Image (tube, helix red, strand yellow):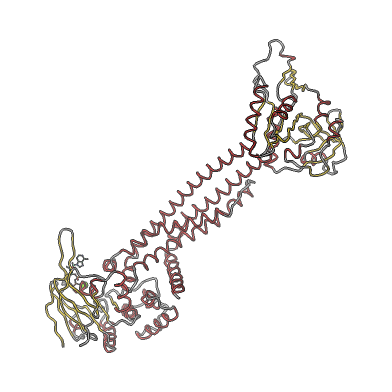
């Protein structure tokens, strides 16, 4: 049996708020196989974003282990995590998180830059990805000049720059009108069809329906885990 | 391969830095001004200081760094005998005996050059110049480092025969003979005519001032602007005798002065200071009154150099402070910059940027600020002395080291003051940074 791309074992994450401790995750365990399309759902404040940050190696568990494609990430140093984020993961955020002073093309190139790609090569990749998300004609535009849906498509192209196997999306359609949202979800379907693993956080049941598996959290604990 | 990769990375960081600085151009420019003024004031002040001290040193050098200058000084007038006020002859100053003593007792002395200095009008027909007539020896040019430009100096033979020959200072030659070559012509002083055998080299403004300064001290009453005319000492003795008369506000005052100046040239520069001590000793033993003055140009030179060092030190401190202020300005802006771009930092970290990448990015920006500021400062700092020397007719000297040093330091300031904000940016937690508004 192939190694699952994500293995969480009794993952805790707590924050100190002054004198009080906030327990955002209180022992979450699950596995996700390569190629799965997973939605993480649950009420606000239940720990979805916290979980996604951990999965995205932006954060480390307070206790428990997280294996990414078999590698124990919880014990890695900052540089190693940065490299993993840059090469094996792609992020898509609710608020797009494009760099405002850079053009569409340059935004897509950012992850390539940090992996030390040749300029010509990375330009080519960025152009191809922009075309793929339907923005081949907007390469020189700044994010401000684009609609929300277009910005999110730039973000998707950027997430794909280093051809990662795992894509993480936090409320990717949360700021979008339904038409734009549908476009984004269609892109997600394509990514999954290519064999990528996609984990998205959403509180919209209609969006969650698109995924093949729904993991529900409540108060930092796994409530249900249903495959369809 | 690895090197070229780093180079491309740096190139891109620089481009990125320029972009984000350009985005806030006014702010970047204002921040840069601190460094611009710091660097520019360092270079300009150093250039002006260097120029001033060069002028001072040239002035002193023109007196001869191997020389010891002795001058007759009128002693305090305490000994005027009552009742004889009207016809009193004041006798003081250096004597031929002093010359002989120095020559005899101090072996490391190469030359001893006596001189008498008389304030006179020198005439060419109806043109008149107020000058100092200096009676001295034929080796004056060599001793005083003041060469003959045209013709020659007078000779030993002319000296011994007390002939009426003279060598004119450059400025008075020009004023007396604006149209003709003076060599071979005559000038008149009182009732006596002197054949012009040579014209001295013009001295630089500063150097000329030095020579006149020495004349000023020796004869007490002469104006510092006077030009000098040289005649054989023997001739001077015959024409003027030992007693020089001065008419002052109707009352008659005469002074008996054998020699106004003695220049002692020492063979080796390292002997100048010890010999000057011996000379002082010798004079104080043989003069009852302090009617002379000893000037050692080398000591003045050393003093001038010391002053210059202190000046440079003060300047350096001012420069350091201004660059410090500039650096603080950069740090301040970079901190604001980092705070403003917290979100961007978070994004970049999420996309694979290592801490070091973030550090580099902000450091490069700081160094661009200080570096461009430094370049502008150098440009301005090189221009200002140029303008000053044109407008104020002051000598300024830009040594190539000062712009280089100022620029290097300003770039370093960027590194030093950019480092803290850059490290702070790199240390941010990616999750926190992403959440930042
Ligand atoms: N950096 C933090 N410091 C303190 N508490 C935090 C922090 N991040 C999240 N929390 C808390 O952890 C809990 C889970 O938050 P989060 O994962 O953002 O929830 P969700 O995304 O499901 O709305 C919340 O109670 C939140 O207040
Ligand atoms: Mg959330």
Query: Horizontal and vertical percent for residue A28?
Result: 15, 75
Q: Is residue B295 left or right of residue A59?
A: right
Q: Is residue B67 visible?
A: yes
Residue A103, quarter of the rendered image: bottom left
Residue reaching furthest left?
Answer: A223
In the image as oriented, which residue stretches furthest toward the top?
A: B83
The answer to whether one can see residue B133 in this image is no
Total labels drawn:
0
- The answer to which quarter of the image holds residue B112 is top right
Which residue sits at x=78%, y=22%? B242
Above or below residue B220? Residue A131 is below
Image side of residue B164 versus residue A46, left or right:
right
Image quarter where ligand 1 lies: bottom left
* Quarter occupied by residue B194: top right
**The C terminus of chain B, quarter of image:** bottom left
Picture quarter with the N terminus of chain B = bottom left
Residue B411 point in image, percent of width and height? 47, 58
Q: Is residue B91 above or below residue B182?
A: above
State the residue in front, B292 or B268. B268
In this view, the residue in front, B15 or A149, is B15
The residue sitting at 79% across, 35% down in the picture is B229
Q: Is residue B178 left or right of residue B395?
A: right
Give coordinates of residue A200: x percent, y percent: 23, 79
């Amino acid at each position: 049996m192939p190694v699952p791309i994500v293995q969480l074992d009794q993952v805790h994450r707590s924050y100190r708020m002054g004198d009080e401790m906030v327990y955002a995750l209180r022992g979450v365990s699950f596995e996700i196989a390569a190629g799965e399309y997973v939605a993480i759902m649950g009420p606000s404040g239940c720990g979805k974003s916290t979980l996604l940050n951990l999965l995205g190696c932006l954060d480390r568990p307070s206790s428990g282990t997280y294996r990414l494609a078999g590698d124990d990430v919880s014990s890695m140093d900052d540089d190693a995590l940065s490299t993993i984020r840059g090469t094996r993961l792609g992020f898509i955020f609710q608020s797009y998180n494009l760099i405002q002073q850079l053009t569409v093309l340059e935004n897509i190139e950012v992850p390539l830059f940090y992996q030390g790609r040749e300029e010509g090569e990375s330009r080519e990749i960025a152009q191809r990805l922009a075309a793929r998300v339907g923005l081949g004609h907007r390469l020189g535009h700044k994010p401000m000049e684009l609609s929300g849906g277009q910005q999110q498509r730039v973000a998707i192209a950027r997430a794909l720059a280093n051809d990662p196997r795992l894509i993480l999306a936090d409320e990717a359609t949360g700021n979008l009108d339904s038409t734009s949202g549908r476009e984004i979800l269609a892109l997600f379907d394509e990514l999954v069809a290519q064999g990528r693993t996609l984990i998205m956080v959403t509180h919209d049941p209609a969006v969650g329906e698109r995924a093949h598996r729904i993991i529900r959290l409540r108060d930092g604990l796994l409530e249900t885990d249903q495959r369809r | 391969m690895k090197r070229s990769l780093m180079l491309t990375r740096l190139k891109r960081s620089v481009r990125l830095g320029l972009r984000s600085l350009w985005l806030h151009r006014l702010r970047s420019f204002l921040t840069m001004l601190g460094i611009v003024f710091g660097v520019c004031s360092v270079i300009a002040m150093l250039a002006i200081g260097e120029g001033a001290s060069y002028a001072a040193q040239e002035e002193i050098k023109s007196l001869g760094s191997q020389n010891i200058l002795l001058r007759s000084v009128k002693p305090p007038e305490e000994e005027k005998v009552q009742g004889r006020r009207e016809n009193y002859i004041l006798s003081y100053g250096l004597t031929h005996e002093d010359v002989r003593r120095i020559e005899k007792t101090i072996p490391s002395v190469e030359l001893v050059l006596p001189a008498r200095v008389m304030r006179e009008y020198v005439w060419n027909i109806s043109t008149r110049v107020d000058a100092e007539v200096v009676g001295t020896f034929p080796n004056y040019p060599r001793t005083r480092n003041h060469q003959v430009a045209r013709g020659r100096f007078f000779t030993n033979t002319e000296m011994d025969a007390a002939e009426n020959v003279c060598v004119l200072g450059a400025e008075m030659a020009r004023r007396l003979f604006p149209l003709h070559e003076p060599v071979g012509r005559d000038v008149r002083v009182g009732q006596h005519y002197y054949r012009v055998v040579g014209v001295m080299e013009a001295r630089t403004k500063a150097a000329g001032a030095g020579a006149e300064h020495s004349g000023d001290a020796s004869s007490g009453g002469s104006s510092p602007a006077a030009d000098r005319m040289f005649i054989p000492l023997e001739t001077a003795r015959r024409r003027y005798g030992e007693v020089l008369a001065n008419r002052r506000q109707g009352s008659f005052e005469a002074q008996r002065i054998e020699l106004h100046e003695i220049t002692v040239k020492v063979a080796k520069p390292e002997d100048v200071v010890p010999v000057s001590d011996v000379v002082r000793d010798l004079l104080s033993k043989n003069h009852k009154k302090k009617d002379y003055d000893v000037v050692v140009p080398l000591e003045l030179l050393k003093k001038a150099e010391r002053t210059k060092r202190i000046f440079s030190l003060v300047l350096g401190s001012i420069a350091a402070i201004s660059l410090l202020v500039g650096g603080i300005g950069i740090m301040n802006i970079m901190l604001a910059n980092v705070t403003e771009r917290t979100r961007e930092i978070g994004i970049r970290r999420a996309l694979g940027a290592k801490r070091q990448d973030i550090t580099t990015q902000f450091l490069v920006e700081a160094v661009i600020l200080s570096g461009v500021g430094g370049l502008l400062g150098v440009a301005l700092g090189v221009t200002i002395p140029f303008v000053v020397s044109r407008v104020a007719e002051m000598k300024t000297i830009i040594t190539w080291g000062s712009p280089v040093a100022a620029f290097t330091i300003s770039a370093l300031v960027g590194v030093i003051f950019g480092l803290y904000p850059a490290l702070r940016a790199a240390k941010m937690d990616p999750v926190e940074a992403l959440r930042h508004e």
